[in-house]
C-alpha cells in the first residue's frame, strides 16, 4: 500500500493555557517550576498581568515550541480589609407563628391541601420545599407535595454600645482574614480603628506570601 506522507497538524493554542501571569502586584519570593521558562527571579517587583512563566520557547531555526507553562510563583503581597459595624441598625424580628401552605401535585393537577396562608408580602420570609414520592423507595411516582412556609417579620431598631460594636467588628475581621489567608502565609498585619457616633470601622492592612501565578 502506498500512502501520502501527512504533515502533523499544528498545535491549536486557542483556549489552551500557555503562559502564567501575575494575579496582582507583588514582590517575588520563590519559584517552583514544573514546565516552561521562568522569566522572573526572587526580589523582582511585578505588576498584575506581568508574565511569570512562559510556555513559548524560541528554538531558533526551527521556530517556536509551544508547551503548557506549569508552576507556582510565591510572592509577597499586601491587602486591605475594611469592616464597618453601625451603632444603630434594623434587626429582623419574627412576629406570630409561622404558617404553611401544602399543595399536592397528582398526575399534573394541583390540589390545595391547606388554605392560603394569607401573608405573601415583603414582610415575610418564604421557604419552599418540594417532596417527591416514590414506589418502594426507588421508582418515582407522578405525585409530589409542595410545602410553602411563610414566616412574617418586622424590622425593629437596635442600638449597640461602642464595646459591642467593636467586639462584633473584630469578630468579623478575624473571620474574613482567616478566609483570605487560607492558602497563604500571613507575615504581618496592622489594624486601625475609627469610632464615630454612627459606625465602628476597622481597617486591616496585612502582608502575606501566596502563589500569584494564574493561567493566561
Image (tube, rainbow, N blue to C red):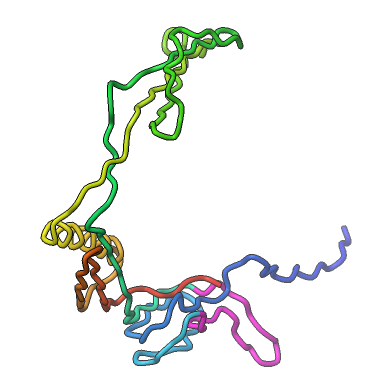
Q: Is residue 144 left or right of residue 183?
A: right
Is residue 44 visible from the viewing direction of this image?
A: yes
Q: Can you say which quadrant of the picture contains the N terminus?
A: bottom right
Q: Is residue 128 left or right of residue 17?
A: left
**Residue drawn at (68%, 67%) of the image:** 14
Q: Residue 15 versus residue 176: which sits nearer the camera?
A: 176
Q: Is residue 87 left or right of residue 50?
A: left
Asked where in the image residue 127 lies, by quadrant, the reply is top left
**Residue drawn at (50%, 78%) of the image:** 21
Asked where in the image residue 201 lies, by quadrant, the reply is bottom left
Residue 47 x, y percent position in the rendering: 46, 85
Is residue 139 visible from the viewing direction of this image?
A: no
Instruction: Spot the residue most to the left.
Output: 163
Residue 60 x, y percent position in the rendering: 66, 92
**Residue drawn at (39%, 31%) of the image:** 124
The span shown in magenta is 49-69
When the figure is inspected, residue 186 is found, relative to residue 151, above or below; the finding is below
Residue 165 x, y percent position in the rendering: 17, 59
**Residue drawn at (46%, 26%) of the image:** 120
Residue 123 x, y percent position in the rendering: 39, 33
Q: Is residue 123 left or right of residue 159?
A: right
Q: Residue 92 versus residue 100: which sits nearer the camera?
A: 92
Asked where in the image residue 99 lies, by quadrant, the reply is top left
Q: Can you say which quadrant of the picture contains the C terminus?
A: bottom right
When the figure is inspected, residue 6 is found, relative to residue 35, above or below; the finding is above
Amino acid at each position: 500500500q502506498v500512502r501520502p506522507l501527512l504533515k502533523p497538524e499544528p498545535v491549536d493554542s486557542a483556549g489552551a493555557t500557555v503562559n502564567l501571569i501575575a494575579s496582582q502586584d507583588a514582590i517575588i519570593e520563590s519559584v517552583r517550576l514544573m514546565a516552561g521558562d521562568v522569566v522572573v527571579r526572587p526580589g523582582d517587583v511585578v505588576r498584575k498581568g506581568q508574565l511569570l512563566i512562559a510556555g513559548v520557547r524560541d528554538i531558533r531555526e526551527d521556530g517556536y515550541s509551544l508547551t503548557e507553562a506549569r508552576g507556582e510563583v510565591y510572592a509577597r503581597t499586601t491587602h486591605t480589609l475594611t469592616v464597618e459595624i453601625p451603632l444603630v441598625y434594623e434587626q429582623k424580628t419574627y412576629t406570630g407563628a409561622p404558617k404553611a401552605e401544602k399543595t399536592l401535585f397528582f398526575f399534573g393537577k394541583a390540589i390545595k391541601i391547606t388554605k392560603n396562608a394569607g401573608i405573601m408580602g415583603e414582610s415575610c420570609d418564604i421557604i419552599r420545599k418540594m417532596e417527591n414520592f416514590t414506589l418502594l423507595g426507588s421508582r418515582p411516582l407522578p405525585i409530589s407535595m409542595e410545602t410553602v412556609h411563610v414566616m412574617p417579620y418586622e424590622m425593629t431598631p437596635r442600638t449597640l454600645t461602642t464595646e459591642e460594636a467593636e467586639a462584633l467588628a473584630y469578630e468579623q475581621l478575624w473571620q474574613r482574614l482567616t478566609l483570605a489567608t487560607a492558602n497563604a502565609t500571613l507575615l504581618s498585619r496592622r489594624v486601625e480603628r475609627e469610632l464615630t457616633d454612627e459606625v465602628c470601622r476597622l481597617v486591616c492592612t496585612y502582608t502575606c506570601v501566596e502563589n500569584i501565578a494564574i493561567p493566561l
